Image (cartoon, rainbow, N blue to C red):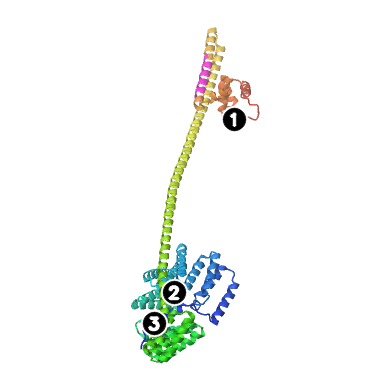
Amino acid sequence: MKLRLTLFFSILCILYCQKISAQGMVKLDSLNSLLSTIKEPDKKVDLILEFLAKPENQYLDNAIDFANRAFVIAQQNSYQKGRIQAMIKLGNCYFRRSDYKKAMELAQKSKEMSEDLRYDKELANALSLIGTIYSELDDYDHSSQYLFQSLKLFEKINDKAGISNALGNIGIDFTSQRDYKKALEYYNKSSILAKEINDQSSIKTQYNNIAVVYEYLEKYDTAIMFFRKALEINIKLGNKLGQGINIMNIGYDQMNKGFFEEARISFQQSLNIFAGLNNRMHMAECYLNFGFCDHADNRMDESIAYFNKALDEGQRNGYYRIIAPAAQMLNQIYTARKDIVNAYKYLRLEKVAGDSLFASKKQMLTSKFELQYQYDKKEFERRQTQQTKNIIMLIIIFGLVAGLVILGLVFSRYRLKTKLVVLEKENLVLEKEKIESELDNKDRELTVNLISLIKKNELLSDISGKLMQLERQAKGIEAKESIALISQELRNSTNDKMLNEFSRRFQEVHAGFYEKLLKDYPDLTQNELKLCAFLRLNMSTKDIAELTGQQLLSIDKARYRLRKKLAISNLETNLVTFLSQL
């Protein structure tokens, strides 16, 4: 009789932790020795994670301890990338122990941190872990959602190993949903990519996955071919556990084909390997498979012996997945023999184990709903937090933009004001220069006029002198008096007109000069004011004498008196400079 085997026996091996072999212990000792020589915390974390990334080290009993050690070191030293990677490793360890709640918590935390820090590879691995957990809980809608997100990220960063792994995980989803065509499509894509990068572990995994699909399709020859390919790689890798599982799976397919003797040889080979590893779970599976094989070959006594061995191992270790089928088969055999006592005995064992399995499945279903509730709650809280952050960010951005606009307007206004001030200053300078230029021109004009007046005065003085000579030469008294009168009037008229003209023009050029002098020095006479004006124009004593018709000595005395009235006691102070500053 051929038995229809399911994925149960093919994947059961990854759900339990195994005892460490002597070779594994040596590796751990070497790792500990190496870690003791490293001082940099980041390098310690990377070394532990690199060790745990090797396929042969992922199922070690204390893999979870090393992952936790890496996490603690990374957290204490703010090594964020190492912290995320360690959490993902821890999540995978808890997943293998069927602690989906802790695995999901770590995966979600890794996802959130990776999103915040923009670590694409770590985010892809976190999404892959979340998808795998949902797949194990038969929630394929959520599983495929996260697995495809993971695939998209791996493709974005061109991580071929990640792409291969994501394709394989998606294939497992399709296998679980019995879409074998799609499953094979993804497994083959994953296998091709794994061969490109020579990832032997991934190639072996996809061979196993493909073989399981062909088992479901009852193409046992093809399934055996792929299991043997996986076995070759496990032999090269020195993976004893993988070898035992591959040989046991080959035995399943040989049994389903009716090749019972070949199947027994395969089961015995796998049993020897599991016994060497002291792997009680897989040893119990081998006993169970021997029982199925002998039962199918109508060797009932041998079948009963192996089912009892499987049952004993299951009862000692609480393996309900072994107890239930073993008790069921024993119940069937004793029922067929009409041995009611033994049939009832094993029926009760089957029921207890079945109830435990049912409770386990129920607990798994409850865990699924709990995880979904918690995840939805956290996602809602995360979206709310993100929405709040976005609103705050928008407010900040709006505030910054508004601030920049206001600052720009203030700056533009300041620049405009500065420009206006500069223009005003330039205008003032130009105006000042214009005024100074006009003053200079008027000063020059005034000076020219003064020079002209001096020349004119000299001419009139010369005429006056000639009239005086003519007066002396005149014969009659009346003629002399007339000439003298004309000379005197000419001199007086010329001096008055000249000085009046000078005063008028000086006031035009230097407006307020007299007023300021009189305000500060009210005792100044008209002659002294005129002398001040002459000196303001930087006229010499000689020029002033010629202009006013006075003697040089008279002008010097007048200057001396003026210094006293102006209270200039310091001989070093120049009178002309003093007046120019008024």
Q: Magenta stretch mostly in which secondary structure? A: helix
Q: Is residue 61 left or right of residue 551?
A: left
Residues shaded magenta: 489-505
User: Based on the displayed image, in which of its 4 quarters is residue 3 positioned?
Assistant: bottom left
Q: Is residue 552 left or right of residue 17?
A: right
**Contact check, label 1 and label 3, Cβ < 8 Å:** no
Which secondary structure, mark 2? helix
Q: Where 530 falls versus 239 (above or below)?
A: above
Question: Looking at the rendering, in which quadrant would you find the C terminus?
Answer: top right
Residue type indicated by callout 3:
Ala
Residue with the mark numbered 1: 577
Q: Secondary structure at mark 1?
A: helix
Which amino acid type corresponds to the residue marked 2 in the rendered image? Ala
Report, in whole angstroms, how far the alpha carbon at label 2 lies from the one at label 3: 21 Å
- Image coordinates of residue 172 in percent, x first then y, are 39, 76
Q: Name the disc covering residue 211, or none.
A: 3
Kindly check if marks 2 and 3 are in contact, taking CB atoms under 8 A apart as contact: no
Gap in Å between the C-alphas at discs 1 and 3?
A: 116 Å
Mark closer to the chain start, 2 or 3: 2
Category of crowding for the residue at label 3, using alpha-carbon neighbours closer than 10 angstroms: few (below 14), some (14–19), many (at least 20): many
Tag 1: amino acid: Thr
Between 319 and 375, the one nearer to me in the picture: 319
Decide if residue 428 is in sight here.
Answer: yes
Dot 3 falls on a residue whose secondary structure is helix
Q: Nearer the viewer, residue 540 or 415?
A: 415
Q: To which residue does mark 2 refer?
A: 161
Viewer-side label of 2, 3: 3
Residue 536 in the image: above or below residue 333: above
For residue 290, what is the image quadrant?
Answer: bottom left
Q: Position of residue 188 (x, y in %)?
A: 38, 78
